[in-house]
Image (cartoon, rainbow, N blue to C red):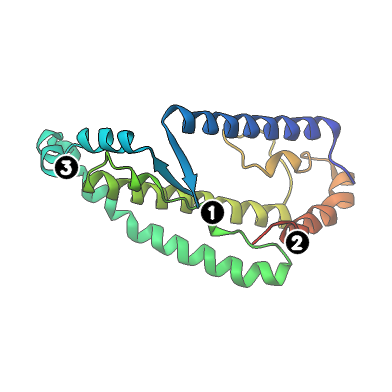
């Protein structure tokens, strides 16, 4: 069974917006004079020299930072251990349970992107911060997709209230109280999760 027309239209609009974002990214490559070489940005030589000239050294960066920023750093980096535990937990979960349920596994590479720390105008502290933020945000996106696929398999039903930031699979879920569609379409929604494996390139 196909998705209701309204949901199909919304999903098509989301895809259009994603395409527009991609076009904007390509424009920025021209504006800031770099190209991608095996997913790595390569700046033109004069831009590289400008970046290096404008880099603020780590010692100066610390000297100019608010003391409260420095005191709060252990709180930020203290979250690394629970984040690592979450990573181990969701990765182990999907590698075991998704095989049992027949759900296509989430690819880490779709959610973890490490490139900002390569910018030559960042100092060592800024680069470390960028790596940490990339990991934390990538992990939460990766975990969210794992949980979203689990929800689609076991409970693809919308809530009675609007969610502030529903995951991308949520619009295709079944309306609250629509028992006939739930019984008719649950298996289709599950099958869609299995078919994603064949469609996704390695």
Q: Nearer the viewer, residue 21 or 28?
A: 28
The residue lying at 53 percent from left, 65 percent from top is: 91
Tell me which numbered mark, 2 or 1, is placed earlier along the sequence.
1
| Residue 70's disc number | 3
Asked which secondary structure carries label 1, the reply is helix
CA gap, disc 2 and disc 1: 19 Å
The residue lying at 61 percent from left, 72 percent from top is: 96
Tell me which numbered mark, 3 or 1, is placed earlier along the sequence.
3
Residue 198, how many percent across, how many down?
Answer: 75, 61
Residue 83, how many percent across, how many down?
Answer: 40, 57
Asked which secondary structure carries label 3, the reply is helix
Q: Quadrant of the C terminus?
A: bottom right
Badge nearest the viewer, 2 or 1:
2
Quarter assignment of residue 49: top left
| Residue 198's disc number | 2
Q: Where is mark 1, residue-wise? A: 142
Left or right of 194 in this view: 78: left
């Amino acid at each position: 069974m196909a998705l209701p027309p309204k949901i199909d239209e919304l999903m098509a609009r989301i895809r259009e917006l994603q395409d527009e974002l991609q076009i904007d990214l390509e424009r920025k490559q021209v504006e800031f004079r770099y190209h991608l070489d095996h997913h790595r940005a390569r700046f033109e030589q004069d831009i590289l020299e400008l970046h290096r000239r404008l880099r603020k050294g780590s010692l100066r960066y610390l000297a100019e930072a608010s003391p409260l920023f420095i005191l709060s750093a252990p709180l930020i980096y203290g979250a690394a251990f629970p984040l690592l535990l979450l990573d181990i937990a969701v990765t182990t979960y999907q590698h075991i349970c998704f095989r049992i349920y027949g759900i296509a596994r989430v690819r880490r590479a779709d959610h973890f992107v490490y490139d900002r720390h390569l910018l030559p105008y960042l100092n060592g502290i800024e680069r470390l911060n960028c790596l940490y933020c990339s990991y934390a945000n990538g992990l939460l996106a990766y975990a969210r997709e794992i949980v979203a696929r689990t929800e689609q398999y076991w409970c693809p039903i919308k809530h009675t209230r609007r969610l502030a930031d529903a995951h991308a699979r949520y619009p295709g879920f079944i309306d609250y109280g629509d028992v006939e569609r739930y019984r008719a379409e649950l298996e289709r929604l599950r099958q869609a999760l299995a078919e994603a494996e064949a469609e996704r390139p390695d």
